[in-house]
């Protein structure tokens, strides 16, 4: 077996935010724990100007990158040199996110096993005052010519990585450290670390199936790979069940959180995977349904959400469901007793104050009462008062996701190319894949809107 390869990476950028800023320089040094076996470096034209305060740190000017290749021109070289190695960087999150974002904007999903040399240094050399690259360079008296240029920083990081690996006297300790670095301790028998590391670190829905191909768990996350690791590293009944049974993991990207929440809701309802079923805390555990009492009056009942196919609306608790029934009863002049809100022997409280027309004592017949009840049903399940479309991020940078709300409900979602974004409502609606009405999806969408006031919404 050949030695483990480490790709020590350093990048310089136009700033600190991966979704906004761009790479101006990249260096990759391939190190096998003993020596450097390959390397790659290039300035990168970021296609925007470098702020002066950044140039002061890195020494990289706009003139220097003017004729440099753009990222897409070196993308293949970057992939090639990183192949079969663990991605290492000093504060790996930074470099990794930038590179991932560059690939994302080209329509590719970039995933690698990764290690952080800051974290490893803390373990290997405890008690230092600072683990910043500059501090470690000083501490180990490493000679570096151009601090804050990609190659020199990557080179210094490689020297430090060498010192970390040297410290480990046996192979096992090295591999334990690598394992710890990638936080993978337990995996189901049929799942390899490589399979997990090849899952995208993007937003979507994932499916775990057993060895007969049956889906036993469906979940969603804004980072599928990270969430899958968490599933197996926990120690409780669900994790253990998954560890025993999962033989394969697949996924579908959604591009944004809202689509993954909604997709998960639909898929769980449709597939009813056995491990999802044992989860007690689904978001909306209670539902209101329409029922009929012995005398033929329609009434609202609160039931466990998983016990019904015909929920009118969903709730976090029995209490909040009852509160909604109370409101509807009040507004539509329904009977408290018929709806189970008044347990008294005679007429209901509302009858006494002329808000109930007497279904409780047979004063009003079912035929007229039920008519008002039917009318009240429209308001119990009408979640949205207006028709509108929400535009959110798509699965790649040239795409947008379109969510449609019409006639009081979420109707479905779909994807469009970004240049169609300015189209009229009818064109946008054509991209929508209509779904069966799903009260849970209505609530997911409403809650998401409440917690994300910055969404792009077009009313019609
Ligand atoms: Zn009454």
Image (tube, helix red, strand yellow):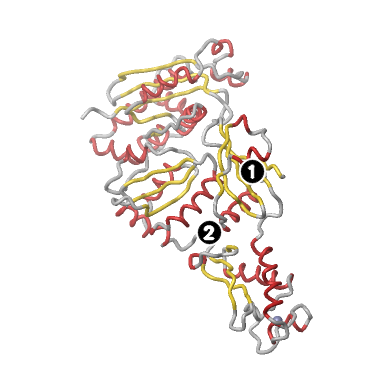
Question: As rendered, which of 129 and 161 lies closer to the eye?
Answer: 161
Question: Counting residues from the N terminus, which is met first, the one under dot 2 or under dot 1?
Answer: 2
Q: Residue at x 66, y 86 (%)?
A: 344
Residue 285 position in % (x across, y down): 52, 64
Q: Quadrant of residue 314?
A: bottom right
* Relative image position of residue 143 (x, y in whole percent): 40, 17
Is 283 on the left or on the right of 419, as rendered?
left
238 in relation to 189, above or below: below
Residue 407: x, y in percent?
67, 53
Between 55 and 389, which is closer to the camera in this rendering?
A: 389
Above or below, comparing residue 324 to residue 211 in the picture: below
Q: Is residue 242 left or right of residue 51?
A: left
Q: Quadrant of the N terminus?
A: top left
* Circles 2 and 1 in contact, beta carbons < 8 Å: no
- The residue furthest front is 367
- In space, the residues marked 2 and 1 are separated at their CA atoms by 22 Å
**Residue 393, position in %: x, y?**
57, 37
Q: Is residue 388 left or right of residue 219?
A: right
Residue placed furthest toward the bottom:
345
Q: Which residue is mark 1?
A: 390
Q: Residue at x 65, y 70 (%)?
A: 325
Q: Is residue 441 above or below residue 165?
A: below
Mark 1 secondary-structure assignment: strand
Q: Which residue is mark 2?
A: 283
Cβ of disc 1 within 8 Å of ligand 1?
Answer: no
Q: Quadrant of ligand 1?
A: bottom right
Image quarter of the C terminus: top right
Callout 2: helix, strand or loop? loop
């Amino acid at each position: 077996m050949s030695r483990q390869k480490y790709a020590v990476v350093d990048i310089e950028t136009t700033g600190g935010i991966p979704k906004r800023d761009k790479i101006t320089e990249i260096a990759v040094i391939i190190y096998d724990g003993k020596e450097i076996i390959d390397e790659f470096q290039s300035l990168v034209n970021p296609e925007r100007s470098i702020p002066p305060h950044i140039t002061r740190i890195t020494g990289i000017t706009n003139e220097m990158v003017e004729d440099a290749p753009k990222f897409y021109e070196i993308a293949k070289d970057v992939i090639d040199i990183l192949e079969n190695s663990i991605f290492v960087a000093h504060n790996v999150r930074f470099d990794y996110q930038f590179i991932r974002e560059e690939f994302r904007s080209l329509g590719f999903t970039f995933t690698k096993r990764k290690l952080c040399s800051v974290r490893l240094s803390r373990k290997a050399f405890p008690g230092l005052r600072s683990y910043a690259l500059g501090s470690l360079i000083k501490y180990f008296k490493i000679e570096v010519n151009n601090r804050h240029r990609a190659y020199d920083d990557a080179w210094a990081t490689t020297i430090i990585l060498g010192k970390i690996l040297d410290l480990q006297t046996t192979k096992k300790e090295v591999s334990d450290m690598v394992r710890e670095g990638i936080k993978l301790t337990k995996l189901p028998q049929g799942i390899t670390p490589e399979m997990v590391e090849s899952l995208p670190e993007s937003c979507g829905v994932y499916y775990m199936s057993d060895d007969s191909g049956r889906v036993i768990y469906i979940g969603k996350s804004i980072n599928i790979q990270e969430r899958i690791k968490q599933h197996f590293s926990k120690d409780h009944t669900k994790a253990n069940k998954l560890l025993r049974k999962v033989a394969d993991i697949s996924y579908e990207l959604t591009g944004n959180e809202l689509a993954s929440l909604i997709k998960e809701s639909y898929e769980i309802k449709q597939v009813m995977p056995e491990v999802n079923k044992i989860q007690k805390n689904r978001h909306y555990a209670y539902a209101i349904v329409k029922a009929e009492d012995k005398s033929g009056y329609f009434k609202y009942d609160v039931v466990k959400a998983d016990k019904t196919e015909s929920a009118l609306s969903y709730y976090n608790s029995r209490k909040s469901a009852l509160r909604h029934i109370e409101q509807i009863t009040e507004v539509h002049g329904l009977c408290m007793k018929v709806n189970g809100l008044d347990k008294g022997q005679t007429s209901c409280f509302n009858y006494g104050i002329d808000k109930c027309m007497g279904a409780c004592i047979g004063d009003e017949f079912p035929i007229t009462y039920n008519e008002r009840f039917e009318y009240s049903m429209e308001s119990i399940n009408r979640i949205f008062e207006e028709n509108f479309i929400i535009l959110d991020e798509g699965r790649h940078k040239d795409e947008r996701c379109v969510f449609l709300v019409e006639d009081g409900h979420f109707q479905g979602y779909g994807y469009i190319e970004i240049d169609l974004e300015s189209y009229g409502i009818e064109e946008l609606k054509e991209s929508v894949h209509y779904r069966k009405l799903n009260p849970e999806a209505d609530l997911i969408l409403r809650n998401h809107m409440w917690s994300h006031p910055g969404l792009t919404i077009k009313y019609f």
